[in-house]
Image (cartoon, rainbow, N blue to C red):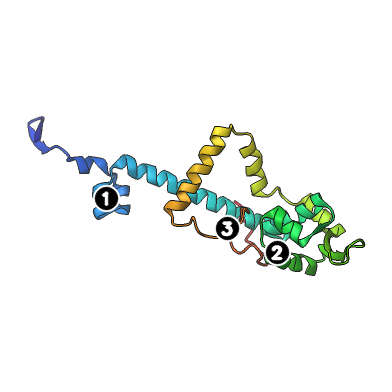
């Protein structure tokens, strides 16, 4: 089919030619581009951008914590849990944070080396060992930024129940689509190994 415009004949763009922007054509070429229309491609890109923002925000916050406190998000969360629970055993910490006892033990070892926690046997039951915060840890928590997952939890709690259910369902489906549903993961918003060291050495613009 042709259109006549001021005496010049030109070919009407085909469906596929109308469906893909130059950016989408470049990014999705081959059979996939033939199957997907512009609307779907734009939706896919919106999802990928949102996922990238979540990953980036988590990474930036982890760097900010390391820069300001020299600690990781799991270390800050563990210190907070000890502060909030008082006398607490390693097993109780593990249950409270939904982490393995081995992971909690490793994090405690690192914090103890930095004189932020100390462990002491219970006076009532010598089989139990309780974790306690030092004064330095108390001061560190006062100055530490609010963990990203605490911010998320507060805003999540403000949502309607149907909105919470929708987010959970959508994220679980995304994990399934990425073949990640069987990956062992703890409910800690952080990147990397949870029991890793934190160097605290970051570029000045790491959180910009």
Q: Local crowd at mark 3 within 10 Å, few (<14), some, or many (≥20)?
A: few
Name the residue nearer the viewer: 145 or 127. 127
CA distance for labels 2 and 3? 14 Å
Is mark 2 in CB contact (under 8 Å) with mark 3? no
Name the side, left or right, on which 192 lies relative to 78: left
First of labels 2, 3 by sequence position? 2
First of labels 3, 1 by sequence position? 1
Name the residue nearer the viewer: 169 or 23. 169
CA distance for labels 2 and 1? 48 Å
First of labels 2, 1 by sequence position? 1
Residue at 68% x, 58% y: name it. Answer: 74
Q: Is residue 68 visible?
A: no
Q: Secondary structure at mark 1?
A: helix
Residue at 49% x, 49% y: name it. Answer: 51
Of labels 2 and 3, the one closer to you: 2
Q: Looking at the rendered structure, which numbered label has been put on residue 49? A: none
Q: Secondary structure at mark 2?
A: helix
Is mark 3 in CB contact (under 8 Å) with mark 1? no
Q: Secondary structure at mark 3?
A: loop
Instruction: Give the quarter of the image for residue 162.
Output: top right
Residue named by callout 2: 101
Q: Looking at the rendered structure, which numbered label has been put on residue 185? A: 3
Q: Local crowd at mark 2 within 10 Å, few (<14), some, or many (≥20)?
A: some
Is mark 2 in CB contact (under 8 Å) with mark 1? no
Q: Residue 77's x, y, as percent?
A: 71, 54
Residue named by callout 1: 33
Q: Residue 124's x, y, as percent?
A: 91, 61
Q: Residue 145's x, y, as percent?
A: 71, 49
Q: Is residue 121 visible?
A: yes
């Amino acid at each position: 089919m042709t259109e006549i415009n001021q005496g010049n004949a030109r070919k009407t763009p085909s469906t596929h030619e109308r469906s893909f922007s130059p950016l989408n054509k470049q990014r999705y070429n081959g059979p996939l581009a033939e199957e997907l229309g512009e609307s779907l491609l734009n939706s896919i890109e919106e999802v990928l951008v949102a996922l990238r923002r979540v990953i980036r925000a988590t990474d930036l916050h982890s760097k900010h914590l390391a820069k300001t406190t020299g600690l990781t998000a799991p270390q800050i969360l563990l210190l907070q849990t000890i502060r909030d629970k008082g006398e607490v055993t390693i097993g109780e910490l593990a249950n409270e944070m939904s982490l393995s006892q081995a992971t909690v033990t490793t994090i405690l070892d690192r914090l103890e080396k930095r004189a932020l926690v100390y462990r002491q046997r219970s006076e009532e039951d010598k089989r139990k060992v309780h974790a306690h915060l030092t004064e330095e840890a108390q001061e560190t928590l006062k100055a530490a930024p609010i963990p990203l997952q605490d911010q998320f939890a507060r805003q999540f709690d403000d949502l309607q129940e149907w909105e919470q259910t929708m987010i959970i369902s959508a994220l679980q489906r995304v994990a399934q689509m990425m073949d990640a549903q069987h990956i062992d993961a703890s409910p800690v918003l952080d990147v990397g190994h949870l029991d890793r060291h934190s160097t605290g050495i970051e570029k000045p613009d790491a959180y910009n």
